[in-house]
Structure formats: structure tokens, C-alpha cells
Image (cartoon, helix red, strand yellow):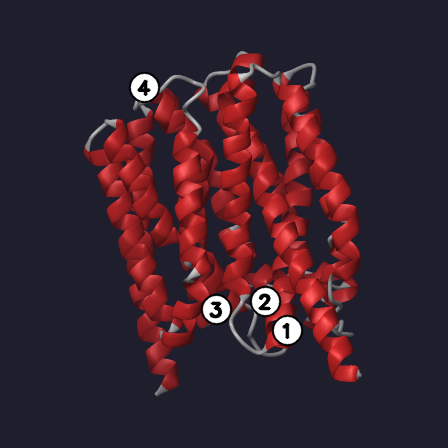
Amino acid sequence: MVSNWFALTRRRARIALLVQYFLSGFIFSALLSRFPAIKEMYDMDMSQLSMVLLSMSIGSLLTMPLCVHLVGRFGSKKLTVAGFAFMTLLPVLTVMPNLVSLYLVSAFYGIFVTLLDVSINGNSIIVENAYKRPIISLFHAFYYVGVCTGASLSLLFMHFAIPVTYHFLSVSIFSLLLFSIIRRFYLKETITKKPIASGQKIMFPKGILLTLAFVALCGRVVEGSISDWSTMYMESVVKLPDYLAPLGLVIYSAFMSLGRFFCDRIRAKYSGSTILLGCCKLAFLGILIILFDDSCYFALTGLFVAGLGISCLVPVIYSLAGRQEDVTPAMGIAMVNTISGTGFLFGPFVIGFIGDHYSMWASFLYIWLLSVLMTVLTLFYRKRERGLSL
């Protein structure tokens, strides 16, 4: 009886998280796919558009150091309540009277995105531990299934010329209804009574975890930058019409999800550092293909190669970070995100600045250079990991 109850509980928690990851990708891809329309709506240049992402990043960065304390005190399940705000604020981004108010709301949006991100990633490791086998990559795969679905739906909304506000409102209502049903099935973890030593509320990674955090920093910038700016790249460099520009995001997210569906099998056979190095090499190659020629063929080929490369990076890093001693899974992830979250502060703004003053091609050259740095850091992490295991 007890074993049947436990099996049912963890299965419901797993399904709930799969749906939540799907919703997160579904919502965010709706925003990214309509960036060109938002840019036109507020009459922004590339630098001003990048300030929207920068504002989200500032909200995220200010929240990230406190996440360790919050998940240690309240637990990851309670923090998922931030998802309601995350979903509600989406249509609000389209009805601001001026850019200042848009940036302010974007900052609050970043706060709730971060709280939800840390809480569901921490909960996914709790569920993985309950299954006693690698399953976390499947959750991240469903995030990009959501991205692919959301981007495909955006193509449909754009084809019928449905206004951005109505598009976002329909996505928000659907997500809120579904989220209110699944949230009750998340698992609770054992909350630490003393999550932070000496009364501190901010913890930073150290040792080998610090190296892993910097790999995560580069990886999240590369992953997020391609997601955020692929639509603009397809429109401004490849010269696709605006209603076809999200096609690049569809291809990228489809192969991201495909790679993550197989990631758990790969994790069962190879070490984390080996997988990370393979991811870096594929990302390096994919972005290089994008830069090689401005044709649609090269862009889409590069996006699917880069998508496969980046696919396993975050699940592997989060899994390693969530298994550190003396912290809960969500706390370990939050510690890594304290460093890697800074990438979202500088990444979007720098890319937008380069794109505005030079070109989107130059922006993707910057992303490629980050993939080179990520490869070097991974080699260093692999060397330290092997040294500690001797």
C-alpha cells in the first residue's frame, strides 16, 4: 500500500513538472517570437529593445543571491507561487504607456522568472532522487517542446495578424488555468533549519562548484542569446519576412528538446565533464556554421547543430550542482545561478548594443567567442574534477 502510494505521488509530481517546464518554454517563446512586433509597437531601436532583456536580467540578478535563503527557509514548492505572477505579467508588457514603465515591469518579470526557475529546477532534482535514476533532462526537454510549440503558435498568430496583446493574453490565461491544477502535485523537500551559516542570507559557490558556475554562466548566455535573438537574426541578416522569422527559433528549440530527450541515456553512460565538453564542441561548430554564410540554409543548419550542442549543458550542470553536500538541491542550483545569472545581466544588453551599432552578425560572432571561452572553462573543470577523484 505504501509503495503504491509513493509510486503514484512521484508519478504525479513528475507529470506536473513536465507540464510546468512545457508552460515555461511556451510562455517565454511567445515573448521572444514577438520581439520584432514589440520593437515596432514601442518604436524602439535594437539597444532599447535589449534594455527590456537587461531589465529582466537586473530583476533576476538582484533576486538570485537571495534564492538560496528563500528555498532553504520556505522550500521549492512554496516558491512556485511566483509562477502565477510570471504568467500574469506577460500581457502587461504590451500595454505600458512608455519605455520607463516597460523596463520597470520587465524587472519585476525577471524577479518572478528567477524564483520560478530555481524552485522548479530544485523540485526536479527531488523527483529525480525519488526515481533513483537520471530523469532531469526529460524535464528540460519539455521546456524546449514548449518553446517549439509556442514559437509555432506565434507563426499562426502572426499569419492571421492577431495583435500581440491578444496573443499574450490567450497564452497567459491558458497557462494560469493549467498551472493552478498541477501545482498541488509538486513534492516537498526537507527544509534545512540552518540553510546559511553565521546568519548570512547570501551564499556563493566555491572550489570546483565555482568553476562549474562559470561554465554555466557562459552556457546560459549562449543558450539564452540564441533563443532571444535568433528571430531578429533571421529577419535582419537572413532577410526572412517577419512572419517567417520565428522559424529559426522553432528549429533551434526542436533540436534542443530532441537532444534533451536523449540526455538522460547519455548521462547514464558518460561522466558529466565528458558530456559538457561534447556540448561545447557542438555549440562551437553550430554557431560557426551560422556565421559562415547569411543564407537560410546555413542559418537553420547551424541552429539545429547548436541546439543539439547546448541541449544537455544545463541539465548536467544543474544535476551536478544539486548534489552538493550540506545543501538542498534548490540551494545548490541557486548557488550556481548566483554566478551564472550575471550572464543574463550583460549578455542581452551587449548583444543588442553590438547589433545596433554594427550588425546582428557581429552579435553572433560575440556569442561564438563565448562558446570558445565555455570550452576552455570546461576543459579546466574536467581537469579539476579528475584531480579531485584521484
Residue drawn at point x = 52 percent, y = 46 percent? 145
Please identify the quadrant where the N terminus is shown: bottom right
Residue, disc 1:
327
Report the side of 386 relative to 61 (left or right).
left
Image-based side of 46 in relation to 58, left or right:
left
Residue 374: image location, x then y, percent: 34, 55
Q: Nearer the viewer, mark 2 or mark 4?
A: 4
Residue 12 in picture, x, y percent from top left: 71, 64
Q: Relative to 58, is 198 above or below?
A: below
- SS of the residue at dot 1? loop
Mark 1–mark 3 distance (CA, rounded to whole Å): 13 Å
Q: Amino acid at mark 1?
A: Val
- In the rendered structure, find residue 209 and report the number of the disc placed on it: 3
In this view, 119 is above or below 381: above
Residue indicated by mark 2: 332
Residues tagged 2 and 3 counted as in contact (Cβ below 8 A): yes
Relative to 214, does residue 178 appear above or below in the rendering? above
| Tag 1 near tag 3, CB within 8 Å | no
Q: Position of residue 281 (x, y in %)?
A: 27, 56
Please report whichever mark, 2 or 4, sits nearer to the chain's N-terminal start: 4
